[in-house]
Image (cartoon, rainbow, N blue to C red):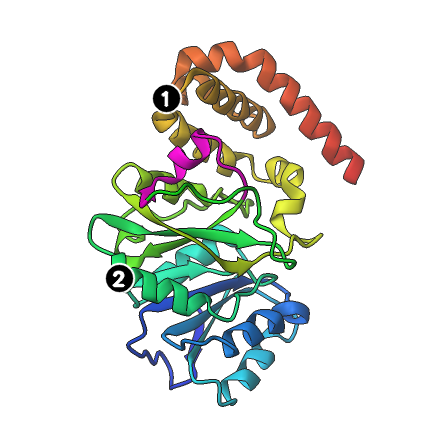
Amino acid sequence: MATGVLFGKYGKGGLNLATLTVFTPTYNRAYILNQCYESLVRQTCKDFVWLIIDDGSTDNTKELVKKWMKEDNEFEIRYHYKKNGGMHTGHNTAYELIATELNVCVDSDDFMPDNAVELITGFWKKNGSDKYSGIIALDVYKNGEVIGCRLPDKKSTTLGRFYDNGGKGDKKLIYRTDIINSYPKYPEFKNEKFVPLDYKYLLADQDYELLILNEAVCMVEYMEDGSSMNMFRQYYKNPRGFAFARKVHMKYDKGFMKKFKTCIHYVSSSFISNNKSFISESPNKLFTVFAIPFGACLYGLIKYNNKERV
């Protein structure tokens, strides 16, 4: 159960009957969080709640949010403070607190186009059903350029099928809250602060498809202090979290090369964490054994890269 400080614009724990929760995990991002807030103020549709998950910030994030709550912005703001644990723990906490039908994560350095909520809620009310886990839509750069490529001209897809068929770039995922909460939480490992978020998305992929909305609903900026820009470091500091995600992928990945690459990453993470039982723990032992030389090379590359950063 979520623990920490929670308050909302309409009273402690207050909820409205919105369709969508926009949730934002944040850590010491008061200097840029206003960009996200201002984009929400500009929304043409206010059928949403903004939930801020403060992952142990030591800056003035709380004071900033309290100030925004006093403003006449026509949507509910909820704030939850928790001990610092990393992005995936922020997602775990958010999912425990969300009560709306849909939810979407907008990172603290990102923001939404003015019509994003209107696009999402209108599209879901017209096309949504129990057959789908939610919506997959477009992330774009600040200049409007689509990140990677556009989505296929189809009604629905799975995230895995999209990337297996040549899809590229980050995409915005809007999930039904009941579906995302039907799968296990992201695990937490002592002294680690990262588990790949696609763990839950992969599980949802096995049971549902996502409706395709070929419209931009999030403007993305990759900050120097963001997780996307520090992936080698994330690998090195959170090997058990990555190994956990690789084992899940081994169960569901399709295609020889994809499975083999997953095993290579699993081996390298196991070397970093000094896990001598990695072969016996692997769901695909044969591939894992063959991947050992390549995993050892990747381990060396990751170790060297992190040595360079010190």
Quadrant of res 219: bottom right
Residue tagged 2: 126
Q: Quadrant of the C terminus?
A: top right
Which of disc 2 and disc 1 is earlier in sequence? Answer: 2
Residue 81: x %, y % from top left: 49, 69
**Left or right side of 170 for 248:** left
Quarter containing the N terminus: bottom left
User: Regarding mark 2 in the picture, which secondary structure is present there?
Assistant: helix
Which residue appears at 45% of the width and 76% of the height? 44
Magenta segment: does it hold 164?
yes
Residue at mark 1 to residue at mark 2: CA–CA distance: 41 Å
Residue ID at (25%, 57%):
128
Which percent across, then down, holds residue 122?
33, 66
- Residue 162 screen position, x and y as percent: 42, 36
Report if residue 23 is visible in the image: yes
Q: Which residue is mark 1?
A: 283
Judged from the image, the secondary structure of the residue bearing numbered disc 1 is loop
Q: Quadrant of residue 308?
A: top right
Q: Is residue 277 visible?
A: no
The residue closer to the viewer here, 21 or 199, is: 21
The residue at 61%/41% (across/down) is 234
Nearer the camera: disc 1 or disc 2: 2
Q: Is residue 24 magenta?
A: no
| Above-or-below relation of 130 to 111 | above
Q: Which residues are magenta?
A: 155-169
The amino acid at mark 1 is Pro
Work out whether residue 112 or residue 18 is closer to the camera in this orientation and state it: 112
At horizontal 59% and vertical 12% (from top left) the residue drawn is 293
Name the amino acid type tagged 2.
Answer: Lys
Vertical placement of residue 206 versus 93, above or below = above
Query: Foreground: 106 or 11?
Result: 106
In this image, 304 relative to 10: left or right? right
